Amino acid sequence: MNVVPPVVRDPAKQKFDTRRLLANAEQQSIDRRYEDFMIVDVDAHHYETGSYSEIFDYIDDPVMRDQFKFSKGQTLHPRSTGGYQEMAGRITRYAHRATEQAADAPHRDIGLTRKWMDAMGIDVACVFPTPMLGLGLNPIVEVEVQYARAYNRWLTEKILAQEPRMVSMLYLPMNDPVAALKMVEEFSGRKGVIGFLVTTVRYKPLYDNVYMKLYAALEERGLPIAFHAATNWSDQSMNITNKFIATHALGFTWFNIVHMTNWVVNGIPERFPGLKTVWIESGLAWIPFVMQRLDNEYMMRSSEVPALKRKPSDYMREMFYTSQPMELVNNSTMLEETFKMIAAETQLLYSSDYPHWDMDLPSTIYDLNFLNEQSKRNILGENARKLFKLDHYISNEKKARLKARNTSSL
Amino acid sequence: MNELFVCPDTELKDGDVRIVQQGRLEIGVYRHAGQYYAYRNHCVHQGGPACEGILRGRVVELLAPDKTYIAQTYDNDDPHIVCPWHGWEYRLKTGECAPDPSLRLKRYDVAVHDGGVYVRM
């Protein structure tokens, strides 16, 4: 019998460190040789709540600025729309990340984001805020406008300008269509701005004529419009659910389903054929459902939607979708069929949603046995690189791995 | 067969865990109600470090005889290992995934001798 001295550690005594938490993700990245190709994460979240004081200083309206400062950001949400993502302490990164060590230069937000990106093997991440996903519900339109502009200024000046690996689609204050258009005019062309974002927990219909100038402006600039799902527990339909799992599983698909359906049946893709759309964080199972429902009814009620020249699913197949949270449980046949229905090889964009509780690693795509190597690389990076016209970029850590591999093989 | 030394038998209290690492293999060794349990530190979902999460009693729902809801509480005799990445839960005593027992953490035997705790590979 051999007695071997191992390394033993007590996790209770370890300081929280994202690289430690994601050590197994890093091993996956090494084992799958992610250094051979670019990975783009099209939906990740950064830590802007840790920079509230900086962001609040960017609010133009001095009265509202004080409201944000003294309420510590509660002005964003006069009523709660979220839930307990952290599952009462089960998802440990929520409670501990404020204490994490990270480089302060050029900005702590960048230092924290680089840590999880490098662990997962992600080269470029499109980052979004978190509490702003419910900002479209704020009854004070000027709060949405003021905070959106403050956040967009802070993000572009403090983060995107200093970190080529972080890009974003900027928040549009859709409750004020004129302000939304101004946002595009002011911020398009800034470093790292790869499109604009509509959060879909909102109740102003996106087919309204007031938005046509906005869509035309985006189409003219070749910038995609993205729709980021969320949930609203106060919505009448969600209000009768009593568990976060219910309002999340349904809400995060429902609000994108409603806006997607309106978008298609009002013929917006026919009006703006050059405007690329990206549907974010609703998983994938809902897409075949909506395609089948709309196609079936379209054949009976085409007179009601004269703008359409093709079946609804034909338009939907030309749209882009992010992958997370991908429905991975027990049915790869269904998942494979879904990939076919949405033309995943060209239209699907990998997303992690890190650091949120239902994040997906790149291996959720890379390990799918019905995809060939090129399809995997398309979904993990190439589709996004082409859509957003990104430069080819491989992180320094991955470059070092590739160099070490090449050296050892000599 | 190899044995990896974890710690002296007196070191772990109920609810404690140690991560034993040899090469790429990591094993979480737990003590609960005087018994030791050991599992691979690798969640079957996306590969998270399951044994570095919290231990939390199984949540149970209490119903009245007429099937009306009363309350929820913890069953601390059935503690769950909770993977910190996504919250997948495993029963500490068996390693079975709580919502799907066909899935489980890889289990290792634990031996106590000569005043020490060892995990067998």
Image: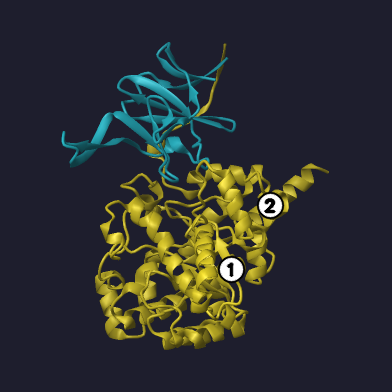
Q: Residue furthest front?
A: A300
Residues beneath discs 1 and 2 located on the same chain: yes
Instruction: Name the front one of labels 1 and 2.
Output: 1
Q: Chain of mark 1?
A: A
Sequence-earlier tag: 1 or 2: 2
Q: Residue at x 50, y 27 (%)?
A: B106
Q: Please rate how many residues cluster around mark 2, counting C-alpha atoms within 10 Å: few if below 14, some from 14 to 19, many from 20.
A: many
- Residue B10 appears anywhere in the view: yes
Q: Residue at x 50, y 49 (%)?
A: A327
Q: Chain of mark 2?
A: A
Q: Quadrant of residue B93?
A: top left
Q: Which residue is mark 2?
A: A35
Q: Which residue is mark 1?
A: A319
Q: Quadrant of residue B61?
A: top left
How far from the left and from the top, in percent, is residue A73? 30, 70
Q: How many marks?
A: 2
Q: Quadrant of the C terminus of chain A?
A: top right
The colour with which the image depicts chain B is cyan
Question: What kind of element bears circle 2?
Answer: helix
The colour with which the image depicts chain A is yellow
Q: Is residue A88 above or below residue A199?
A: above
Left or right for A49, reference A344: left
Kind of residue at badge 2: Glu
